[in-house]
Image (cartoon, coloured by chain):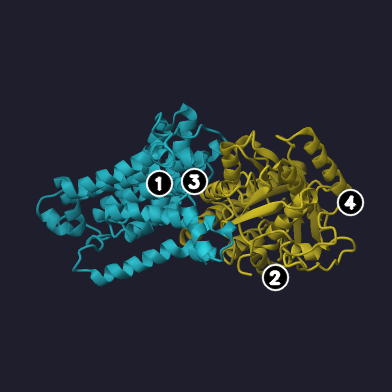
Amino acid sequence: MLESLTQIFSLIFSVSFILTVITASTPLLLAASGELVVERSGVLNLGIEGMMIMGAACGFAGAYLSDSTLVGALCGIVAGAALSTVFAFLTLGLAVNQVAAGLALTILGVGLSGLIGAGFVGQQIVQAPRLYLPVLTDLPVVGRILFGEDAFVYFSIALIIGIWLFLYRTRAGLVLRAVGDNHISAHALGYPVLRIRTLAVLFGGACAGLAGAFLSLSYTPFFIPGMTAGRGWIALALVVFASWRPGRLVAGAYLFGAVSILGLALQPLQLGVPQQLMNSLPYLATVVVLVLISRTRGTAGSAAPASLGVVFVPDR
Amino acid sequence: MKKWNIVAMAAVLAAAGLTFHAYAADKLKVGFIYTGPIGDLGWSYQHDIGRKAMEKALGDKVESTYLENVPEGPDAERSIEQLARTGHKLIFTTSFGFMEPTLKVAAKYPNVFFEHATGFKRAKNVSTYAARFYEGRYIQGQIAAKVSKTGIIGYIVSFPIPEVISNINATMLGAQSINPNMKVKIIWVNSWFDPGKEADAAKTLIDQGADILTQHTDSPAATQIAEQRGVHSFGESSDMIKFGPKAQLTADTDYWGGYYTKRAKDVLDGKWASEDTWGGLDSGMVVMAPYTNMPDDVKKMAMDTEAAIKSGKLHPFKCPITDQDGKTVECKGGDHLDPGQILSMNWYVKGIDDKIPGK
């Protein structure tokens, strides 16, 4: 028993384990950051998977044609945002049911990305470059972890800090939260509810697109249809797990990533931990969080935005 | 995940259904069901190459339809039935998980011929076919034992079905024939296709000492990681040398074109019968990708082993074989295991330090 625990600890605190976890967590964090803002504005977009795979396809295409990771990442962002305009048009313009529109968006994105990416399957690009700072990156242990990642990883952290500042330290963030909690009041106060929500949806699409671009430019630098393999749905669960709070979102993303890598890394050690259990842990945790949220609703104020998923038509 | 797959399937079927009627009726319509995208560069991709080869060989006597990304399990039934209902007289279902759905649909459509890949249940109008991938795996095991410095093979696997288990065993028997102390580390990723997870598993295996990666999953992620980290790998299903020009040693590739052409021709000639085909290196169903990134003597050894297996002189599962617990396995096929034993394999050979999930 003790020996097993020592083995697990030395595994968890090894540099290579932490590096693998960072790579696995980054796409989840990027996609979930965008969705957090979308949901905070009162819109539920289930189309993350579709926008993400579009980002992966267009990001790869962009990087392949231009030989530049930056161009690829921008293409991914634009592709995700472009697809989200379809969702915005349906749910905000035509007041269509958000769940149905989101699912349709995923199906559309998966199909369209296959079409766009078809010509790029099997092609090679140079993997996104990693930061290298003389001395700092060469520091033992922390050097590679803190100063040797690629731009996506640093950007994902900066992004969520930016979102936190925006939501809690700016007037615009306050308005966005107000729209998400009570769109009728916000509307009565003269705030452009639909315009704010449209911008939030576009932002969410851009983030999902960037997360997809990370997959095809850095995680596994190639494009294959369906390569997101359900990560969009995990990002969705993550937002709930984080109870719509940016700080918890970072913790959750890294926890989800760590548990999934642990599920793989423990297997060769033959410690008798069932891998099926490890694989289901993030979702079990999400269920537990949901139960806790529902118990504290009304007192702690950490529950879902009150208008989440509710269709809003001005002047009704 | 599951939910939108079903919806997507419905949409695909609706679209496919419309186009079916546009074709002339006198051609033999051949249907294919793939579990992955044809762009996976692995399993489904190779089947699609086979389909195209059949179309090319038989010209305007046949026309073919395929449905890709069909989830394994009960949902597949609908897709298979859709092909049967729309006039396809020969239907290939190309993944293990399509076994029961294929049999169910076949019972309803006695005039349609079905072919199920990698399964073991047949019916009057259901044939089975598979390739003896384990022959290639045995060669790979030998190469691994020669090339590896750490003595550890990293093995990324999907689901504990007999084909996967027998391939792990063949790899280890090959490796042990060169170096009895070779070790294998196994990671089950519970998916045929999840590039990110396959990459994570590959990194983890390298971190734990493996310097040869092999896989029974469909994407080239592991080969790409091997290339980045400077270790070696084997491609799976298709030649993945593009993703690992310095890493790939060889690949156990499948070539189905010859078989698909023959079976379609059998239907055209009215000679189709339910049978079990299990082709190996000798039949051209399993083809080894060029031996690369290894010393000449290892290359020669690999080619000699390949020739010996082809001529029947060497059987990867030659007796005696000891299982994981040290018991000698009953030898039903004379001096080697019989096909039934290999096709239903659910035990590890001695020297594998892993437990089969769910066992």
Q: Amino acid at mark 2?
A: Ala
Chain of residue at mark 1: A
Residue placed under numbered mark 1 in the picture: A26
Q: Which mark is residue B312?
A: 4
Quadrant containing the C terminus of chain B is bottom right
Q: What label sits on residue A16 in the rendered view?
A: 3
Report, in whole angstroms, how far the alpha carbon at label 1 lies from the one at label 2. Answer: 49 Å
Q: Secondary structure at mark 4?
A: loop
- Closer to the camera in the image, B74 or B161: B161
Tell me the tag on residue B51.
none
Of all chains in the rendering, the one displayed in cyan is A
Q: Amino acid at mark 1?
A: Thr
Task: Measure the C-alpha gap from mark 4 to mark 2.
Answer: 37 Å
For residue A160, side relative to residue A255 (left or right): left
Q: Residues within 10 Å of mark 1 (few under 14, many from 20)?
A: many
Which amino acid, mark 4?
A: Gly
Q: Secondary structure at mark 2?
A: helix
Reply above or below: B233 against A270.
above
Task: Choose between A218 and A172: the one closer to the eye.
Answer: A218
At 17% across and 59% down in the image, what residue appears?
Answer: A182
